[in-house]
Amino acid sequence: MLEILEVSIPFVLVLIFEFPFIKWLKNQGIGQHIRTEGPNMHNYKEGTPTMGGLIFVPVAVIVAMAFNKSPQVILLALSTFAFSIVGYFDGVIKVLRKSSEGLNPKQKLVFQFIIAIVVYTIVERMNPHTSTYIPFGGRWEMGWFYPLFAVVFLVGMSNSSNLTDGLDGLAGGIYVIGAIGLVVLSIFRQLPLTMTLTSIGAILAFLFYNLKPAKIFMGDVGSLALGGYIGALGVLYGYELWIVLLFPVFIIEALSDIIQVVSWKVLKRRVFLMAPIHHHYELKGKSESNVTISFWVLDAIFVMVVGGIMLCISH
């Protein structure tokens, strides 16, 4: 019964409050500015309200802490909120400049690394470890290298989620699918469920407004927070590699962007028509909806396979 409330309360709250927020943004003329280097088929989205994460992130965080005041859940909630603050300032700068450019990449990375270092420092006191679980295996002891790995992983997951947020419903849908797998993992490994459940409820309601044609975008305030949460959860318990298995699309999107940048700087050649990879498929002639659903299915396959193996092992 408690778990149902942890999903349903944020779902109802976001469903209620996101609508007047969209109307307020429209009245204030606050909308998304489309990147000039982006696909031309996205030009019609110019002016669409953004920063929807300003509603669903606080709702998920506050409801989670109301249901579970354990130090672990509070850390996860505050980590999520901290990453959302970076996205908030990025969004505010974009609004003030009336541009698609907010914080520059270096500024964003500096703030993200500061948050990641603080989170890891707290984790080191709360649940000290220097190893990560190998899916369906033992543990990989990293020793002195683990702190660096953990911090980079946390920043990487936050950016991976952010890079995925480029099509209507894509990042939100991937998050919900992966988070369902995270619920299964949490049950088997006795990890806290609260924040995962409240975030699922909040994002499901947000998707009601974000599916194509999107009435609002989550913005960096939402996407950085989602990746920040799953990254912090992985680091807290040493389940980083499990997170990778449950959110493979986030990883693929980030890798495609890295490959594109490195290839261009080193070889002066582009591997993809455009990065992240969802834009590559759009320019190949695939519709936005087709790309989004295909990526949802890919993530769902991973989640079902991982969940199925866990069930088999448990029996």
Image (spheres, rainbow, N blue to C red):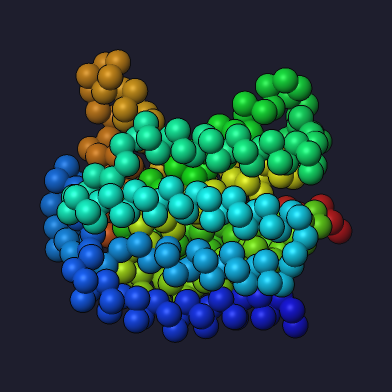
Q: Quadrant of the C terminus?
A: bottom right
Q: Is residue 286 above or below residue 2?
A: above
Q: Position of residue 79 (x, y in %)?
A: 59, 50
Identify the residue at the far front of this view.
96
- Where the N terminus falls, by quadrant? bottom right
Q: Residue furthest top?
A: 266
- Specify the farthest residue to the right: 315
Residue 250: image location, x then y, percent: 47, 47
Is 285 in front, or is 219? 219
Q: Nearer the viewer, residue 255 or 86?
A: 86
Q: Is residue 159 above or below residue 24?
A: above
- Measured as percent of width and height from the top left, residue 217 is found at 33, 63
Q: State the residue in front, 32 or 191.
A: 32
Q: Position of residue 14 (x, y in %)?
A: 47, 77
| Image-based side of 153 in relation to 253, left or right | right
114 in relation to 242, above or below: above
Q: Classify residue 284 as left or right of residue 127.
A: left
In the image, what residue occupies the spot 64% across and 41% down?
119
Residue nearest the observer in this picture, 287 or 18: 18
- Residue 199, by quadrant, is bottom right
